[in-house]
Image (cartoon, coloured by chain):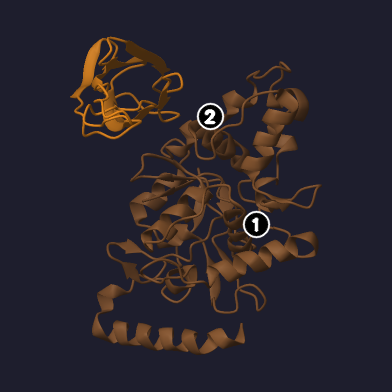
């Protein structure tokens, strides 16, 4: 990591130049904003940085802090949050019998509010066979192995509805992914990817989300690229976007061939990026522009 | 598309003659008629084309919706409640279906 430091200070220097050149190019997060859902549930949107995972971040910020007041307000009211439609559909799927075994999720797992509480906060997670799995893998494993049902597409409506519903059961809980032990090699792989430049534009995740956080990328604010808010309702898609779908979009925008959703690479990257948000509250289903 | 289900939110209480904020949301794809499927065929338009709200038989709002309105249309408006009564909300789908929701409201 040491070799990255010069590049970092260079980026800081250019950020300062940009600031002198045009104050409007900076769009810092609004640190005075408090994320409170329906006036009741407080969600942590700022968490301290640490030397091992995020040595170059002054503090961890949720992407929510970077959004406009209108967008932030939508997420603070469950009635106005359009992602709740997906979460409700997910709740229906939870109790719907599917597959040759004639079972629903609920038949094994019971009340999701209890059994699924905290699950999203520890995803992705190394399974019993030592393989790193995202929440989608766990869902599809249940479907194919236990229910005798067909696997859902990674970013299909059923899957994103289900992950929205599951994520909601961990809302407000801090991100707490395991990065040591069996997860260590995956985490290393993810970190390697994060600092690798991809595509014709030769951009790494860090170039935008670490070096240039707070600046504008055309008309949008560059956040830290945290994933604690996923699955997220993206207004421009008018639908739920999964973590891997967002990764794909970012890598595509560097004009690179992207990895597939659910690929080894994206699961490793998901673990590393999740760890960069350690301590931030799971937003369950967030709203982003 | 999953089942279309209207959602309504009214304030908990109000005095007679107050103007209250009414919020409604309905899940709907609002297919514009401009898009094509993977085979290149036009996906036919299917939107909610009209939304109305009545209070005790009096029209509060009558909205014509157009294809540019995004999925899951959300409506927020004010209504004067001179006495206790019932709100009737109606959404008209291009396919002829009509979705209604009623909500009783009490003034103090």
Cα separation between marks 2 and 1? 23 Å
The answer to whether tags 2 and 1 share a subunit is yes
Q: How many marks?
A: 2
Relative to A229, does residue A199 appear above or below in the rendering? below
Checking the image for residue A88, the label placed there is 2
Residue A169 in view: no
Letter of the orange chain: B
Say which quadrant the N terminus of chain A sits in. Answer: bottom right
Relative to A232, does residue A218 appear above or below in the rendering? below
Query: Mark 2 Cα within 10 Å, few/some/many (few <14, many 20+)?
Result: some
Give the chain letter at badge 1: A
Tell me if A104 is positioned left or right of A93 in this view. Answer: right
Q: Residue at image x 59%, y 70%?
A: A192
| Residue A106 image offset from top left, x and y in percent | 71, 25
Query: Mark 1 Cα within 10 Å, few/some/many (few <14, many 20+)?
Result: many
**Residue carrying label 1:** A175
| Residue A195 image offset from top left, x and y in percent | 53, 73
Letter of the brown chain: A
Give the chain letter at badge 2: A
Q: Residue at image x 38%, y 64%?
A: A254
Tell me if A185 is positioned left or right of A79 in this view. Answer: right
| Residue A176 image offset from top left, x and y in percent | 69, 58
Mark 2 or mark 1: name the one nearer the start of the chain: 2
Residue A244 in view: yes
User: Could you say which quadrant of the image residue A265 lies in?
Assistant: bottom right
Q: Nearer the viewer, residue A248 or A287?
A: A248
């Amino acid at each position: 990591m040491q070799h990255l430091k010069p590049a970092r200070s260079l980026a800081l220097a250019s950020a300062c130049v940009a600031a002198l050149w045009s104050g409007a190019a900076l769009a810092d997060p609004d640190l005075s904003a408090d994320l409170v859902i329906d006036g009741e549930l407080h969600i942590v949107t700022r968490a301290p940085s640490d030397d091992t995972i995020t040595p170059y971040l002054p503090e961890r910020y949720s992407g929510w802090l970077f959004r406009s007041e209108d967008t932030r307000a939508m997420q603070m009211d469950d009635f106005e949050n359009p992602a709740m439609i997906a979460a409700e559909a997910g709740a229906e799927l939870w109790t719907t019998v599917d597959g040759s075994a004639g079972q629903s999720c609920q038949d094994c797992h019971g009340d999701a509010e209890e059994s699924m509480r905290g699950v999203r906060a520890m995803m992705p997670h190394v399974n019993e066979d030592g393989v790193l799995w995202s929440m989608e893998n766990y869902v599809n494993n249940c479907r194919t192995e236990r229910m005798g049902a067909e696997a859902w597409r990674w970013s299909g409506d059923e899957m994103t509805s289900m992950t929205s519903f599951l994520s909601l059961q961990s809302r407000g809980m801090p991100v707490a992914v395991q990065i040591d032990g069996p997860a260590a090699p995956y985490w290393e792989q993810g970190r390697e990817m994060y600092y690798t430049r991809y595509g014709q534009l030769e951009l790494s995740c860090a170039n935008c989300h670490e070096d240039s956080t707070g600046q504008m990328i055309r008309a949008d604010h560059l956040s830290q690229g945290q994933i604690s808010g996923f699955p997220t309702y993206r207004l421009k898609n008018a639908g739920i976007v999964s973590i891997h779908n967002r990764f794909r979009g970012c890598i595509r925008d560097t004009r690179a061939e992207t990895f597939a959703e659910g690929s080894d690479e994206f699961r490793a990257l998901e673990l590393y990026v999740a760890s960069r948000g350690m301590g931030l509250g799971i937003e369950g289903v967030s709203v982003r522009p | 598309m999953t089942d279309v289900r209207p959602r309504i939110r009214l304030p908990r209480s109000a005095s007679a003659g107050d103007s209250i904020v009414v919020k409604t949301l309905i899940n709907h794809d609002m297919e514009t008629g401009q898009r094509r499927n993977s085979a290149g065929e036009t996906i036919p338009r299917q939107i909610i084309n009209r939304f109305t709200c009545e209070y005790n038989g009096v029209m509060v709002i009558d909205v014509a919706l157009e294809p540019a309105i995004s999925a899951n249309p959300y409506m927020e408006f004010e209504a004067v409640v001179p006495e206790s009564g019932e709100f009737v909300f109606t959404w008209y789908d291009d396919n002829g279906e009509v979705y209604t929701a009623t909500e009783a409201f009490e003034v103090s």
